[in-house]
Image (spheres, rainbow, N blue to C red):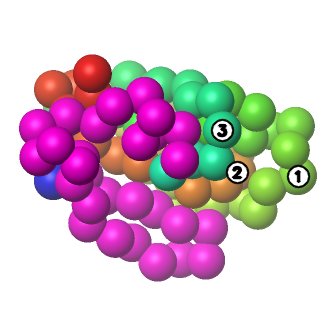
Amino acid sequence: MARLFKTNGDIQDIGPGNGVCFTLEELQAIVGGGIEVVHLHAGELMVINENHRKECRRLNGAATYLYEKGTGCTDLIHGDALICKKGEVE
């Protein structure tokens, strides 16, 4: 089960439509455009909008924290972010 971290602070458990893995189209709908995939720790991925820095999206504090914790890098994440296992992405 994946978790969607919304910019308003809500966290939702979500699953792929086919019950196995998210399609590209599903991921694009979730993040509102083209996707960028970030490899975190323990086989997890963060899926964000590839233009999250350019499109004046709202800062996502929870996703920023998870990004920094999972990558050891500093960056600000804007927009909604999906955290899932590697096997949940086509």
Residue type pointed to by label 3: Gly
Q: In which quarter of the image is the C terminus?
A: top left
Distance from disc 3 to disc 2, alpha carbons, whole Å, reads 13 Å
Residue 27's quadrant in the figure?
top left
Percent x, y of residue 35: 57, 29
Query: Which is nearer the eye, 40 or 28?
Result: 28
Please give the range of residues in magenta: 2-29
- Judge left or right: residue 20 versus residue 26: left
Distance from disc 1 to disc 3, alpha carbons, whole Å, reads 13 Å
Q: Dot 1: what SS? A: loop
The correct choice, above or below, for 75 with respect to 64 in the image is above
Is disc 1 in contact with disc 2, using a CB cutoff of under 8 Å? yes
Residue at 66% across, 54% down: 79
Percent x, y of residue 62: 51, 62
Q: Name the residue under label 2.
A: 78
Q: Mark 3 points at which residue?
A: 33
